[in-house]
Amino acid sequence: MSYLEYVVAAYAVFAAVLVWDFVAPRIRIAQTLRAVRTLEARRRAAVVRAPDTELTR
């Protein structure tokens, strides 16, 4: 491996890590927001159902 190939490979790895550092948090934020929205929808559905249902013996 010549010096030029080493430098090109080092810059390629640096660029890949830089892109991953940019993308990874956005993926995690999107997953978290989706989970929170799903949980909120379930809670709202449970609140809507709760007053209408009566326990019987």
Image: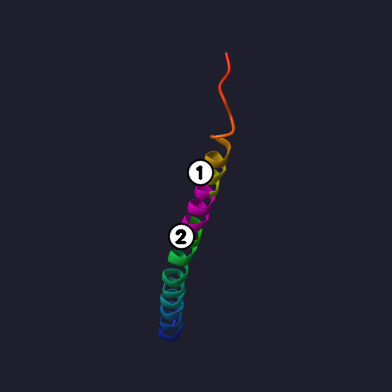
Q: Observer-nearest residue: 44 or 15?
A: 44
Q: Position of residue 51 (x, y in %)?
A: 54, 35
Residue 30, compared with residue 50, is above or below; it is below
Q: Observer-nearest residue: 38 or 32?
A: 38
Residue beneath disc 2: 28
Q: Observer-nearest residue: 46 or 25?
A: 46
Question: Measuring 54% from the left and 44% from the top, which residue is drawn there?
Answer: 42
As measured in the structure, the alpha-carbon distance from the residue carrying label 1 to the one carrying label 2 is 23 Å
User: Which numbered disc flags the more N-terminal residue, 1 or 2?
Assistant: 2
Q: Observer-nearest residue: 43 or 8?
A: 43
Residue 33, compared with residue 22, is above or below; it is above
Q: Position of residue 1 (x, y in %)?
A: 45, 78
Label 1: which secondary element:
helix
The numbered mark at residue 7 is: none
Determine the image quadrant of residue 9: bottom left
What is the quadrant of the C terminus in the image?
top right
Q: Amino acid at mark 2?
A: Arg
Q: Nearer the viewer, mark 1 or mark 2?
A: 1
First to last magenta residue range = 32-40
Q: Is residue 33 magenta?
A: yes
Q: Is residue 45 magenta?
A: no
Q: Residue furthest bottom?
A: 4
